[in-house]
Amino acid sequence: MAEKFVVKALPREGRGKNDSRRLRRSGKIPVVVYGGGEESVAAVAELKDLAAIIRSDTGANTLFSLDIEGVDESRVIFQDRQIDPVSGRLLHADLRRLAKGEKIEVTVPVHLIGNPIGVREEGGLLEQQVREVRVLCTPSNIPESIDVDVEELASNDSIHVSDMEVSDEIEIQELPETLIASVVFVKEEVEETVLEDEEGLEPGIVGEEDEDGEATDEEATEDGGE
């Protein structure tokens, strides 16, 4: 069962960049909560509490409780995050308040399971074209990942979104023809490399003298014909 997170927060009174910097120096960050048929609320939460959620198994797709002092507790999920490009530190978060039974769109990773026939028996190479997909579901049904069995893939075989198996509660929001993974045949590439190496050898130059200073066969033939 997923760990339950509860984050305590305070209503945010200040505004502007200077106030945001002051909050970050004290280990806090500004957040905005909206959705669920209620008004938006600006609040301040502890960075360590939100960072712990992002580091959890379900990451930014984690549903958690936000308890703002003086405001009712809400079930929320990360909608958007501002990250410092240098330190990787969370700077600001938009949190979406969820109504009961509401479906949301989230991105989940795609994991390939198994060693394809085309790799282990035919010398092919497994390539994964898509590593995450968007899905629509209720928060309680958000999967940690979607596993795709590639064990039976032979060379030149492929798997598309339409081949992915998920529960009835989950709707994949990608085009059915989107390519997920394929086994490519690499033998031709090896042969082409060998051929290029052979073509790269320098041929003998007609008319060159050998090490003893004697003319080549072709020159000798020409001299004898005069």
Image (cartoon, grey):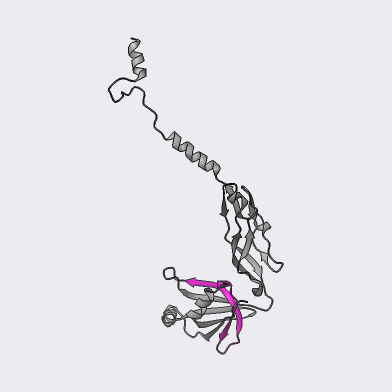
Quarter of the image for residue 65 reads bottom right
Residue 64 in the magenta stretch? The answer is yes
Extreme-top residue of the structure: 226
Extreme-right residue of the structure: 168
Extreme-left residue of the structure: 213
Q: Position of residue 192 (x, y in %)?
A: 50, 39
Task: Please give the name of the residue rendered at 68% of the width and 57% of the height, measured from the top-left corner.
Answer: 163
Q: Position of residue 47 (x, y in %)?
A: 48, 79
Residue 70 in the magenta stretch? The answer is yes
Q: Position of residue 78 (x, y in %)?
A: 56, 74
Residue numbers of the magenta segment: 59-83
Report whether 190 appears left or right of 216: right
Quarter of the image for residue 210 reads top left
Tell me which secondary structure the magenta stretch mostly adopts.
strand
Foreground of the two, 93 or 12: 93
Image quadrant holding the N terminus, namely bottom right
Quarter of the image for residue 134 reads bottom right
Q: Position of residue 15 (x, y in %)?
A: 47, 81
Report whether 13 appears left or right of 151: left
Q: Is residue 224 above or below residue 191?
A: above
